[in-house]
Amino acid sequence: MEPEVIESEMVLPTYLSFKKVQMHEKYPKGQARGRHWKHLKQIIQAENYQNYPPDEPNYVNIESPPSMNPCKKICDITGFEAPYSDPRTTLRYANTEVFKHIRLIPNESVQRYLALRNAQVVLK
């Protein structure tokens, strides 16, 4: 090196924030490499699910009590939230374009849409 560089009192930091940190600098030998996630089998083995009551929902028991919140009304055509329902066919719709489409659908198709959500009604 040149003598001017060696004699200067300027000290460079060992870590520059704009440089990418190498893995061997971040994790020296013998240290853990960060967070390890547990798999579902490990969680189940660690917990004592036999001690829980059978009606309490957990990782093993997927049965849970019914929700206290009201069901969301979904548009029968598009699948979006439907604030409106057609009084003639009782199909739910999200906007005016869908309403125009509902009025053009024949009665057999309307019955099929209603059967999908178990709301079959005999139309006059």
Image (cartoon, rainbow, N blue to C red):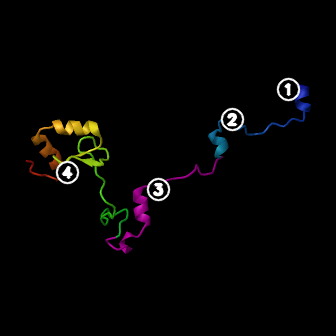
Mark 4 and mark 2: span between their CA atoms? 57 Å
Decide whether residue 101 is among the magenta residues.
no
Alpha-carbon neighbours of circle 2 within 10 Å: few (<14), some, or many (≥20)? few
- Which residue is at 68% across, 35% downward? 18
Looking at the rendered image, the disc whose residue lies closer to the viewer, 1 or 4, is 4
Residue matched to label 4: 117
The kind of secondary structure element at disc 3 is loop
Q: Is residue 107 left or right of residue 31?
A: left
Counting residues from the start of the chain, the first of labels 1 and 4 encountered is: 1
Mark 4 and mark 3: span between their CA atoms? 39 Å
Looking at the rendered image, the disc whose residue lies closer to the viewer, 1 or 2, is 2
Residue matched to label 3: 38
| Quadrant of the frame with the N terminus | top right
User: Residue 101 placed where, x, y %?
Assistant: 21, 36
The kind of secondary structure element at disc 1 is loop
The kind of secondary structure element at disc 4 is loop
Q: Is residue 59 left or right of residue 28?
A: left
Residue matched to label 2: 18
In the image, residue 85 above or below residue 100: below
Q: Which residues are magenta?
A: 28-55
| Circle 1: residue type | Met
